Image (cartoon, coloured by chain):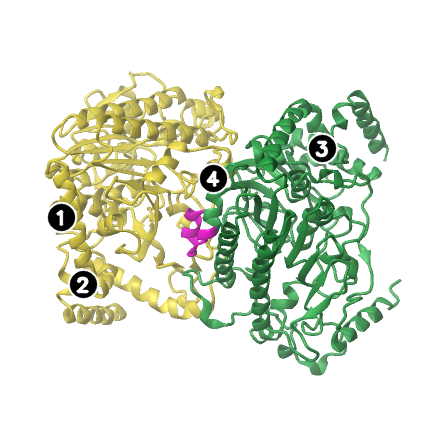
Chain colours: A yellow, B green
Amino acid sequence: MTLLKTFASAVGLVMAASPLAFSETKLNHDAEYYVLQAQHGEQWKKDDKAVDDKLAQFKKKNGGKAPNIVYILVDDIGYGDMGIPELNALRGYETPNVNKLANEGMRISRMYTEPSCTPTRVAMMTGRQPHRNGMGDTAVDIAGFGLAGKEVTIAEVLSEAGYNTVHIGKWHMGDIAESWPHNQGFDFAAFPVHQQGQLTIFHDDAANEEIAYGIGENNYDSRFTKDRWFRPDASAMVTALEAKKGGKPKEVYMKPGERWNEKKYEEMNYRYQDQAMEHLKKLAAKDEPFFLQYWPLYPLTGARVPYDQYTTPNGGTYVEKLKLLDKWVGDIMAEMEKLGVADNTILVLMGDNGHFTKYSPGSGFTPLVFRGGKADTTEGGVRVDAFVKWPGMIEADSIVSDIFQVSDLFTTLARLASAEDNIPTDRLIDGVDQSALLLLGETKGRRDHVMIYTGNKLAAVVKEHLKLEVPPPGKNPIGANFYDLHRDTREEWPVSTEVGAWGGAEFVRVIQRHMMRKQKFPDEGPARGIPYDGITNLRPESQAAVKAFLTKQKAPMM
Amino acid sequence: MTLLKTFASAVGLVMAASPLAFSETKLNHDAEYYVLQAQHGEQWKKDDKAVDDKLAQFKKKNGGKAPNIVYILVDDIGYGDMGIPELNALRGYETPNVNKLANEGMRISRMYTEPSCTPTRVAMMTGRQPHRNGMGDTAVDIAGFGLAGKEVTIAEVLSEAGYNTVHIGKWHMGDIAESWPHNQGFDFAAFPVHQQGQLTIFHDDAANEEIAYGIGENNYDSRFTKDRWFRPDASAMVTALEAKKGGKPKEVYMKPGERWNEKKYEEMNYRYQDQAMEHLKKLAAKDEPFFLQYWPLYPLTGARVPYDQYTTPNGGTYVEKLKLLDKWVGDIMAEMEKLGVADNTILVLMGDNGHFTKYSPGSGFTPLVFRGGKADTTEGGVRVDAFVKWPGMIEADSIVSDIFQVSDLFTTLARLASAEDNIPTDRLIDGVDQSALLLLGETKGRRDHVMIYTGNKLAAVVKEHLKLEVPPPGKNPIGANFYDLHRDTREEWPVSTEVGAWGGAEFVRVIQRHMMRKQKFPDEGPARGIPYDGITNLRPESQAAVKAFLTKQKAPMM
């Protein structure tokens, strides 16, 4: 604590010494941002002017309107799975439509996400890394928590600026009402309450194929089961909801007594694609700019049914769905052309985290250029394919090596939509404005670092091309492992003691600044509430499951 | 033996049953070739006709002459090190000239080499995998053996067909006279006798930097050294020779008493590039078609001198040299344009085997999409970047997924040069004719398998996208490890028992056929002789080193 206090006054000293350089943004960023701003603030001002000019020119040509935004977030994709024909060739499948998108847009080669679904989605939606709002963990069943209503999402920011907003597909930020997209800024939302654990991995078909490894009803011996509430029942959990802004949601797909299976999961995926296309048309027909968020559940899939659909030389379950998804992306791009919105829309396509390696190699994927996958804090968990296309505004067929964190999308899209004034200034915003990188090109990024959390624990720090694996408490940082990500993409060859001796100390300062900043903006827990509250047609089995959950919560724990 | 005999009569039966299908080629190939020919012989005949037509058209346009060939073989390069901007971006360096070549030519995405320098070079030069002629091992010092004079090289094949032939750079196929390029078909050759172990890894500068780990004179305590002949002395070994066809070679660079160092290694590399450019000009000025073989020693380098030349964000020693090499490739391509031979020359650029991981990560490289490096039989050892450009004849910006083994270049280049009749028919030729793949495109390859040897031991077998790690003798093949190379590029997730149960038995048959074939064409040893014999200016210290070597050979061993 003494060390922290000494450190705090040293930080205070620096801040006092250059108050102007630190006050350019109204937002409250993390400490490292200000270290960079102190060095580059003057250049950033010039670049901001150039960005403003480009945006003004665009608006002039676009009838005074800000650009539309289509944001497609793909589940569980690593770097190089899409958009690189030379790597397609190695793996026995093709992604021609995404390859085309790569040729027409910018590849962000250092896009960092969070290590799993929920945290990445929270970071993008709020501009805040999920340790700040208790959303660092991923729930797979009824859990009674979610994204707090007081969080301000990109949908709210854009909505307030006059955008029409629609969310289609995976949401996975809670099973309580305030966490749902129609209560978080979207005019319309169609989404599953939970995620693929329920929808494809431990449903009845998967259990029959032993994918669910004893979770499902079909392959465990229920005569010895005393606790009927121990296993989640995929079919008793609420599947998918649809709702309008502020309204009550209705469950679709399932009638009381029905069982969930792979066929229904397939229908759900196709329906989301259809809904995305349908809403694209509706949104394009309106006067206001729009924000269409489409988060497919594919390629993640569980059971190997239907069996006749394995058409790639690779033959993997996920690969097959990626092929389909690639086609769907192509359909969306073609529809955008047809509707005349291809040129005034920012199209973002990216993955939410690395492969789900628990299903390797049957999925068709194993980690390729990085090590690890979903839930890992090695690069394989957090480095994904990411493309941004905006004809005439973002350089086609370009590749940038600047660091980008998924939370930056929040701030950057707000800025590109001229909605940055709607970003709240009463909380810490991790996402920095990367408009200059997108519009002016490589080296214009405003981030040289990423704090990589697993849940609420800081696990690794990236600064430039160096990565520190945060050592356990009490371990001398001089013994910590450092990796050179240029030379060693897989983090298998720790770099020398010399770098460790300098870097250990300097990285400690980076971490200390980050932790100090939390004294002003402390981490909070998630919102908690009654699961499924307010669903108009809650099935009896779902009601029973909620009751079981609440009863379990009341068991004496201390 | 009984099993083999039974198997032999079964093979005999098949061969007897379809003599025609098996007699299309005059060459003696390995057994697996005939299995494919029995299935595709009719189609191959049609494709051969199409290839003949294309070649005839080319010759007509080219004044009746066969194409020139420039063959650049780069030392120690893995898949994706060159030619893929998205992977350049990850690693902090760029290869713009090779990327351009990739756009103008064909990438062979499954080019298999041998696992190290000597064997790969032997396979390319003779069309024979080096277990056949005792060249499977890599010598790093005076060894008294080499490629036999009775081997017929691609240079001899082309020479006999009227080509002018020049070899510049690394050779590494022996320290005896008959093994040297001017005695193996080249009109002129400039080459080091040994390789980079001597030239950059255990010379004096490297020893000073402890790269040579105690080999060099400067960092071991010679007071305790009893055997003065145990360590090679980089400076006493012959460095580089130059000679004309059939002539006596002369050592260049070194005077008696001089010491070899990194500066001299650098000069050697620059001189080879200059010589390649100079001979390109001379060859282009002549009437006959030419074969220019340029095998740079870079990117392999040892000492970190001179220190002021680290200019990439990656900063690796090899990466810096790869950047230089990329420039040199660009210079050669530009010169070819200038000389007017860009359109009538087949340009091949490829690596000889994977990274030298003993120098990772300081080299700037670690294995990227495959596992392992030089000397490993995992894909990281034997899968390399490979590009072939021939404007108007080979599709630009194409990627093929057919399997190609480096020995195929021998047969294929002979065919493209209309010199296939000079290939000897008295021995086994592993290299198959892949002209149809190059000229007609993907899926036209005539190989679905690779026998991967380490030294004289079969270590792995690739058939289609499946790879068998050959189990140790006596182990039941049902327990052998199989990998699906599409899904698992790093060979870390053995595929299921089902594939093993079928594949184990079928792969055994593949191996049996291969081994049976050796009864007709047995493996032989290399040629042996007096090291350095016939060099006109052999230095006294080199003479002493040869004497020491010969004395050691005479020590009673049995």
In this rendering, position of residue B414 left or right of residue A400: right
Residue on which disc 3 sits? B32
Could you tell me which chain the residue with mark 4 belongs to?
B
- The relative height of residue B358 versus residue A331 in the rendered view (above or below) is below
Q: Are marks 1 and 2 in contact (CB under 8 Å)?
A: no
In terms of secondary structure, where does tag 3 sit?
A: helix
Q: How many marks?
A: 4
Mark 1 → mark 3, Cα distance in angstroms: 69 Å
Mark 2 → mark 4, Cα distance in angstroms: 43 Å
Residue A421: % across, % down: 11, 47
Could you tell me which chain the residue with mark 1 belongs to?
A
Residue B165: % across, % down: 67, 52
Q: Amino acid at mark 1?
A: Pro
Q: Nearer the viewer, residue A532 or B278?
A: B278
Secondary structure mainly formed by the magenta segment:
helix
In terms of secondary structure, where does tag 2 sit?
A: helix
Q: Which mark is residue A424?
A: 1
Please name which of the two marks, 1 or 3, marks the residue nearer to the observer. 3
Q: Are marks 3 and 2 in contact (CB under 8 Å)?
A: no
Please name which of the two marks, 3 or 4, marks the residue nearer to the observer. 4
- The relative height of residue A312 versus residue B273 in the rendered view (above or below) is above
- The relative height of residue B200 versus residue B283 in the rendered view (above or below) is below
Mark 4 → mark 1, Cα distance in angstroms: 49 Å
* Residues flagged by tags 4 and 1 on a common chain: no
Q: Which mark is residue B397?
A: 4
Mark 3 → mark 4, Cα distance in angstroms: 31 Å
Q: Residue furthest bottom?
A: B223
Q: Are marks 2 and 4 in contact (CB under 8 Å)?
A: no
Q: Which mark is residue A42?
A: 2
Q: Amino acid at mark 3?
A: Glu
